[in-house]
Image (cartoon, rainbow, N blue to C red):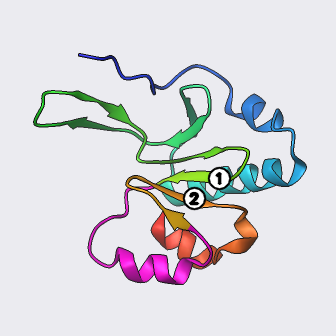
Amino acid sequence: MAETKTKPTGASVKAFLDAIEDEARRKDAKALAALMKRVTGCTPRMWGPSIVGFGSYHYEYASGHSGDSCVVGFSPRKGEISLYLMCLGDGAGKLFAALGKHRRGKACVYVKRLADVDAAALQKII
């Protein structure tokens, strides 16, 4: 069975965020880190080389594949910020409708910049 690539590392979150070249993306990433820390009460950790994650949980699929992941997190990619959120339950549709300009994948929410989304809705989703 393939080994999970995205694991917590000892890398510095601060160094990762400080190294983001684009000033606006760096500012958004630092704001997201502060928001997620405040909402979750968890200290940020690097998960793999590019995900800032908060908290952790263990999962196991029927196939037997299992691993650990962050409860919430984000990755400040070049084109969009990927948000990793565990908000797929009842009521999620209303929250996402209030979020503003975004798109969703199976396990991610993508935003171009924080200014495009409603801060209160984002906080509730987190």
Q: Nearer the viewer, residue 1 or 16?
A: 1
Which class describes the residues within 10 Å of circle 2: few (<14), some (14-19), or many (20+)?
A: many
User: How many numbered discs, if any?
Assistant: 2
**Residue 55: x %, y % from top left:** 44, 42
The residue that label 2 is drawn on is 110
**Residue 92: x %, y % from top left:** 36, 74
* Type of amino acid at the residue the image marks with label 1: Ile
Of mark 1 and mark 2, the one earlier in the sequence is 1
Residue 68: say if magenta. no
For the residues marked 1 and 2, what is the alpha-carbon distance in whole angstroms?
6 Å
* Type of amino acid at the residue the image marks with label 2: Tyr
Mark 2 secondary-structure assignment: strand
* Quadrant in the picture for residue 32: bottom right
Which class describes the residues within 10 Å of circle 1: few (<14), some (14-19), or many (20+)?
A: many
Residue 81 is marked as 1
Give the residue drawn at x 47%, y 76%. 96
Left or right, residue 91 beside residue 55: left
Give the residue drawn at x 73%, y 63%. 113
Left or right, residue 8 beside residue 33: left
Looking at the image, do the residues carrying marks 1 and 2 touch, with CB atoms under 8 Å apart?
yes
Q: Which residues are magenta?
A: 85-102
Residue 86: say if magenta. yes
Give the residue drawn at x 51%, y 52%. 41
The correct choice, above or below, for 91 with respect to 58 in the image is below
Give the residue drawn at x 60%, y 79%. 100
Residue that extends furthest to the left in the rendered view of this protein: 62
